[in-house]
Image (cartoon, helix red, strand yellow):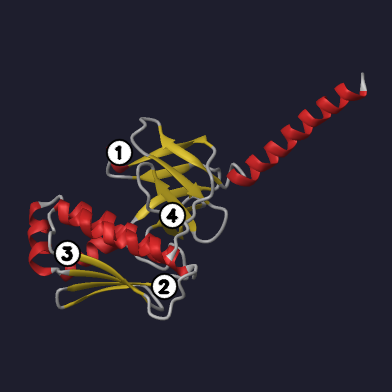
């Protein structure tokens, strides 16, 4: 074998090793992260068990859910959203059961069918976060809330601070919630009558409250995903407040 040919072969092998290592670093251990779907294809999701909290994102949604664990029968654990609703059950054998109202009987086994990248909030600058809030206001206007303004409050937060990513994520989740609620004629009428301003505010902990005609969504922007309420918790809280 000539030295040149040996170098070519060696380079190709090295390239395969590097590419494989890069893929492994991107997707993580297959038993701890991956894309799953039900046999009928109605529900698909990515679950990321690389750290705490366990994170999940359903297909077709930009929202990442932080799940808490609770012991369950037969050496299994139940994973719940922040509103207390069960989403998954994971058994010691590796079996994963998904709970969804899209499924006949309310639950079904989910099978790993693809690798997946770790779930993380997208990075955002102050300008991008504020632009997202402005865009959401225009979107809600088109959806039936013409007088609803969306803004951010983060006094003292430097323009380059990492917390702006958490604020931008909270804008997205709030948008998911309100856009869905505005599809209901009753909810649309109530929101249009009672709300004029949605304020997403950096705070020490997450919370949702009504201040006159302002909906205040407080988040701990330094705690990605767990620092803000999920869309389901937001929807329930807004419904109770209004």
Give the left or right position of residue 70, taking residue 182 as reference: right
Image quadrant in which you'd find residue 128: bottom left
Quarter of image, res 159: bottom left
Q: CA distance from mark 4 to mark 1?
A: 18 Å
Residue at numbered disc 4: 78
Q: Are marks 1 and 2 in contact (CB under 8 Å)?
A: no
Q: Earlier in the sequence, mark 2 or mark 4?
A: 4
Q: Classify 37 as above or below 7.
A: below
Q: CA distance from mark 2 to mark 4?
A: 26 Å
Residue shown at the point (32%, 58%) measured from the top left: 173
Q: Residue beneath label 2, please? A: 220
- The residue wearing badge 1 is 103
Distance (Cα) linking label 1 and label 3 = 35 Å
Reading the image, the residue beneath label 3 is 148
At horizontal 36% and vertical 38% (from top left) the residue drawn is: 43
Percent coordinates x, y for residue 161 in the rendering: 49, 70
Q: Residue 63 or 137: which is nearer the viewer?
A: 137
Instruction: Report the side of 208 relative to 30 (left or right).
Output: left
**Which residue in the rendered view is the most extreme toward the right?**
2
Q: Earlier in the sequence, mark 1 or mark 3?
A: 1
Instruction: Pick whichever of labels 3 and 2 is earlier in the sequence.
Output: 3
């Amino acid at each position: 074998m000539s030295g040149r040919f040996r170098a070519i072969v060696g380079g190709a092998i090295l390239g395969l090793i590097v590419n494989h290592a890069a893929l492994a670093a991107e997707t993580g251990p297959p038993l701890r992260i991956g894309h799953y779907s039900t046999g009928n294809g109605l529900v698909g999701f990515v679950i990321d068990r690389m750290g705490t909290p366990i994170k999940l994102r359903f297909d077709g949604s930009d929202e990442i859910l932080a799940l808490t664990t609770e012991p369950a029968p037969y050496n299994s654990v139940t994973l719940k959203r922040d509103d207390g609703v069960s989403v998954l059950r994971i058994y010691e054998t590796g079996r994963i059961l998904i709970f969804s109202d899209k499924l006949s009987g309310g639950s079904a086994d989910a099978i790993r069918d693809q690798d997946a990248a770790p779930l993380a909030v997208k990075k955002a600058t102050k300008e991008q976060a504020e632009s997202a809030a402005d865009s959401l206001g225009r979107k809600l206007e088109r959806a039936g809330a013409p007088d609803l303004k969306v803004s951010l409050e983060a006094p003292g937060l430097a323009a380059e601070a990492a917390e702006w990513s958490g604020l931008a994520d909270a804008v997205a989740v709030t948008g998911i919630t309100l856009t869905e609620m505005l599809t209901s004629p009753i909810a649309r009428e109530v929101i249009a009558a009672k709300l004029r301003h949605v304020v997403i505010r950096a705070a020490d902990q997450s919370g949702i409250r009504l201040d006159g005609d302002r909906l205040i969504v407080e988040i701990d922007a330094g705690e990605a995903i767990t620092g803000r309420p999920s869309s389901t918790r937001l929807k329930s809280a807004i419904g109770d407040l209004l």
